[in-house]
Image: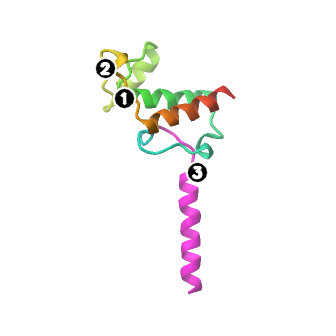
Amino acid sequence: MKKVILFYFLLFLFITHLNAQKLNDCSFCNSQLIQPEQINELSVDEIQFLINDIYARKGYRFENMDIDLYYSGMDWYKPEDDNTHILLNPVEEQNIRLLWEKNMR
């Protein structure tokens, strides 16, 4: 019985650690809320990258040529003709809000 309890405790710690890992991209930001622990240690540039990543995954066409060139190399990036048609779902909106708040500090 002690081994089972220890196993579940270690499993819980492992899952908690995975969830608290630093966020490197926003491939799941359309369906999972970003946790503050995931972005606490990120720089302003890393936060801005995550914001751009959310928009890029929606097809946002960037005016900055360096950013546009970076995302043009991604097979999933399909830029829209008009950015006015970009719609974020509630999870993406919350994630953008959290990232902006972190970025402003």
Q: Position of residue 100 (x, y in %)?
A: 59, 28
Q: Nearer the viewer, residue 104 or 22?
A: 104
Q: Quadrant of residue 48?
A: top right
Question: From mark 1 to mark 3, how far is it between C-alphas?
Answer: 25 Å
Mark 3, secondary structure of its residue: loop
Instruction: Tell me the quadrant of the picture where the N terminus can be found.
Output: bottom right
- Colour style of the rendered protein structure: rainbow
Question: From mark 3 to mark 2, how far is it between C-alphas?
Answer: 33 Å
- Which residue is painted at 46% across and 17% down in the image? 66
Q: Amino acid at mark 2?
A: Glu
Q: Label 1, on which residue?
A: 58
Q: Amino acid at mark 1?
A: Lys
Q: Position of residue 41 (x, y in %)?
A: 65, 40
Q: Nearer the viewer, residue 70 or 83?
A: 83
- Which residue is painted at 58% across and 70% down in the image? 10
Highlighted range, magenta? 1-25
Q: Label 2, on which residue?
A: 80
For marks 3 and 2, the one nearer the N-term is 3
For marks 1 and 2, the one nearer the N-term is 1
Q: Amino acid at mark 3?
A: Ala
Instruction: Tell me the quadrant of the picture where the C terminus can be found.
Output: top right
90 vs 77: above or below: below
In the picture, measured across the screen, residue 74 lies left or right of residue 1, that is left
Mark 1, secondary structure of its residue: loop
For marks 1 and 3, the one nearer the N-term is 3
Q: Label 3, on which residue?
A: 20
Label 1 or label 3, whichever lies nearer to me, is 1
In the rendered image, residue 9 lying in the magenta stretch gets the answer yes
Q: Main secondary structure of the magenta part?
A: helix
14 vs 52: above or below: below
